[in-house]
Amino acid sequence: GIGMGMTAPVSITAFPAEDGSFQQKVKVSLRIPSQFQANPPCPTDESIKIEERQEMTIYSTQFGGYAKEADYVSCAAKLKAALGSDAAYRKDFYLCNGYDPPMKPYGRRNEVWFVKE
């Protein structure tokens, strides 16, 4: 019942299939604004959970435009290739992040994050 506005980034946890595409299971995460973090409002929808994201070190790449699943998959493949086989990161998921509202047509920022092990 409390309007918190939109925050950035909107983060989608992707669970890649063998071919690199997203599995049907994804998790969308929104940052709770600073003024609500100490005492966040309780969700009334059972499918919404409040989670604390632990500190992490990431490998990241950035790209522009209106991001679609294919764009995130492509950038994840490029990041994987750039890191090579020596980098230790979680292979069971990665994070797809968008920073801009839908009505922003130019200068959009999107990122793919691999979480370092």
Image (cartoon, grey):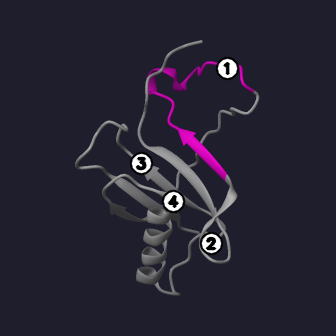
Residue drawn at 51 percent across, 86 percent down = 86
Identify the image quadrant of the N terminus: top right
**Which mark is first along the chain, 4 or 3?**
4
Asked if the stretch drawn in magenta spans residue 9, the answer is no
Q: Which amino acid type is marked by label 4?
A: Glu
Residue 76's x, y, as percent?
Answer: 48, 70
Label 4, label 2: how many angstroms apart (C-alpha)? 18 Å
Q: Residue furthest right?
A: 46
Report which residue position mark 2 lands on: 91
Asked if the stretch drawn in magenta spans residue 27, the answer is yes
Q: Is residue 48 left or right of residue 31?
A: right
Q: Which amino acid type is marked by label 1?
A: Cys
**Which mark is first along the chain, 2 or 4?**
4
Q: Secondary structure at mark 1?
A: loop
Q: Residue furthest top?
A: 1
Label 3, label 2: how many angstroms apart (C-alpha)? 21 Å
Callout 3–callout 4 Cβ contact below 8 Å: no
Residue range corresponding to the magenta coloring: 26-45
Mark linked to residue 96: none
Residue 58's x, y, as percent?
Answer: 47, 63
Label 1, label 2: how many angstroms apart (C-alpha)? 32 Å
Query: In front: 37, or 70?
Result: 70
**Which mark is first along the chain, 3 or 1?**
1
Q: Residues within 10 Å of mark 4 (few under 14, many from 20)?
A: few
Q: Secondary structure at mark 4?
A: helix
Report which residue position mark 1 lands on: 42
**Which mark is first along the chain, 1 or 4?**
1
Callout 1–callout 3 Cβ contact below 8 Å: no
Mark linked to residue 98: 3
Report which residue position mark 4 lands on: 69
Q: Which amino acid type is marked by label 3?
A: Gly
Q: Nearer the viewer, mark 3 or mark 2?
A: 3
